[in-house]
Amino acid sequence: MALMNPSSVTGELHASNVDPVIRAVSVNHAYESNTGWVTALRGFNLEIQHGEFLCVLGPSGCGKSSFLRMLAGLMFPLEGTLLVNGHKITGPGLDRAIVFQEPALFPWLTAAENVGFGLEMAGWGKSAVRARVADVLSIVGLSEAASRYPYQLSGGMRQRVAIARAWALKDAAVLLMDEPFAAIDAINRVSLQNHLVRTWIAEPRTVVYVTHDIDEAVFLADRIAIMTPSPGRVATEIRVDFDRPRDRAVPAVAMLKQQITGIMHGLERSA
Amino acid sequence: MTTRLALGQQSASGARVLHLPADDATLDAATLEGYSKTRRTQARRRKLIRGTIGIAGLLLLWQAMSWYYNLALILPPPTVVLRDVIETLLLIRPQPWLYGPSIYQQLLASFMRAIAGFVLAAALAIPLGLLVGRNRTVREYLEPVIRLLYPIPGIAWIPLAILWFGLTDKAVIFVVFIAEFFAMFFNTEAGARAINPLLMDAARCYGATGFTLVRRVILPATIPYIITGLRIALGGAWRMIVAAEMLAAKTGVGFVLMQARYQFRAADLMMAMILISVVGYGTEKLIVRTLERKTIGKWEISQ
């Protein structure tokens, strides 16, 4: 692992690669509240390479979720450029798959139907959808739950179905994950993180994962983009080179966590 | 004491001791299913007994009033009315039938009109409710019109309906349509507006747009509200049919009711009222409950 400055990331990680999957250039955003305009993002720059698991780490209210919603096409920045595979984002699309903080499953569809929803919308044939759904459900370990409705699943299982729904979109350039385990109790969170790593190993994808949890970022990410408190921008980036699945108890991991904690406290103080 | 303690046993000394199951006799699925079955049976029996007592109380009060104030002519006692109901239904009335076609034809005529008005109202109100609930442009155009029409009661449309359609089925169906449109429209609209924004985000992110979005997400998400609207409107349609038929028809239960008043036959009048109650209750139970079981019962969601 090494501290590095953002501009050097592209060259070092993927010297041979062409364009980044996602490129955010000078993104500024503000919204109007009762008390006037609030600046959410200022001078936000970030690039995400193909195949990379990137964690955007920042304190609450730093604008990291806004950034993810912009990538999803659910909101738009006031200023700046946001590109997916070189194209400007004009709205939601099946080239990006998203997992929200809550499962957001359709209660009237079974787990399998929820997972297949995006594929159906993408125009896949029935048998192709069925095969892909079966594959993805077995990757996330929920084959037995295929025909159950969301209310018949535990909170953790629901979130795994939501992850499977995103993973199912094979042709999506990037998976967007917005603090998917933040609402889950600590014990289940750890097991869901393990599940996520297993899923990622089984079928690696480009992932942008937003979180405020340092442990989670160190456990999951290839690279961590640490954001400043509001108004948010990427202050520094850290590469995490440990092999997966990672051991949470290894001293080097603990040291990295401490280092990140120090950086975040520093940012907090200077804000 | 022993009968009260279904799960307990009485020891030889007479003291109550709780029955402790052996280690292998845990609370297995079959035992628990047995418990919940017992509970369901008990609840059903309790409701039946209490409901019967309520109805019996009303009949008793009715009988007492009729007898005490000597009102047999305008408030015939329940014994007379219930006999009239049975004799009419079995077509063995000793008194002449003064109201045209048989009671079954009259009920059927009313029922068909009510259903026709109800279906027409649903066919317009549900799509319009979804549209107004989800689309700001449509909402801003239509909301004032609908809000201004809403305060006009259904019966106020009867004279105009007679003017337009004469004393025909069309007039009655039109009145039912107008009267029941609003219950379904407002419920559907409220439901469409109340959809969890996160579900809409998910639907859009996973590629649902236009009519697919309506059919696959907006409609099912609104179903609990739509069913509430359907239930209110179905009851309302049956009530409105009687009012409309009293003024604008030559057949139907409303017509029978009005004729019985002209003939001064209070027992027939009340017989018609009881049949209105029974048919209305049965219809609600059959149509709405079936719909509920097939949708929100299966998904365990509610409003």
Image (cartoon, coloured by chain):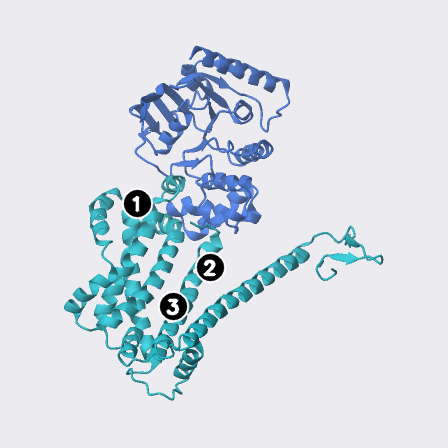
Chain colours: A blue, B cyan
Find disc 1 in the rendering and name its residue: B134
On the same chain, marks 3 and 1? The answer is yes
| Residue B280 position in % (x across, y down) | 38, 68
Q: Quadrant of the N terminus of chain A?
A: top right
Q: Are marks 2 and 3 in contact (CB under 8 Å)?
A: no
The disc, 2 or 1, on the residue closer to the chain's N-terminal end is 1
Query: What's the CA distance linking mark 2 and mark 1?
Result: 26 Å
Q: Amino acid at mark 2?
A: Arg
| Amino acid at dot 3 | Gly
Q: Residue furthest right?
A: B13
| Chain for numbered disc 3 | B
Question: What chain does badge 2 belong to?
Answer: B
Q: Nearer the viewer, residue B152 or B32?
A: B152
Pick the residue in front: A200 or A67: A67
Q: Which mark is residue A50?
A: none
User: Is A193 left or right of A45, judged from the image as shown?
Assistant: right
Q: Residue at x 32, y 31 (%)?
A: A89
**Residue B119 % position (x, y):** 30, 63
Q: Give me the C-alpha separation between circle 2 and circle 3.
A: 20 Å
- Residue B107 is situated, as x and y percent measured from the top left of the image, at 34, 75
The quarter of the displayed image where residue A17 is located: top left
- Of the numbered discs 3 and 1, the one sitting upstream in the chain is 1
Residue carrying label 2:
B293
Mark 3 residue element: helix
Residue wearing tag 3:
B280
Which dot, 3 or 1, sits closer to the camera? 3
Could you tell whether A152 is left or right of B207 in the image? right
**Residue at x-position 39% and y-position 71%:** B279
Looking at the rendered structure, the secondary structure element under dot 2 is helix
Q: Amino acid at mark 1?
A: Arg
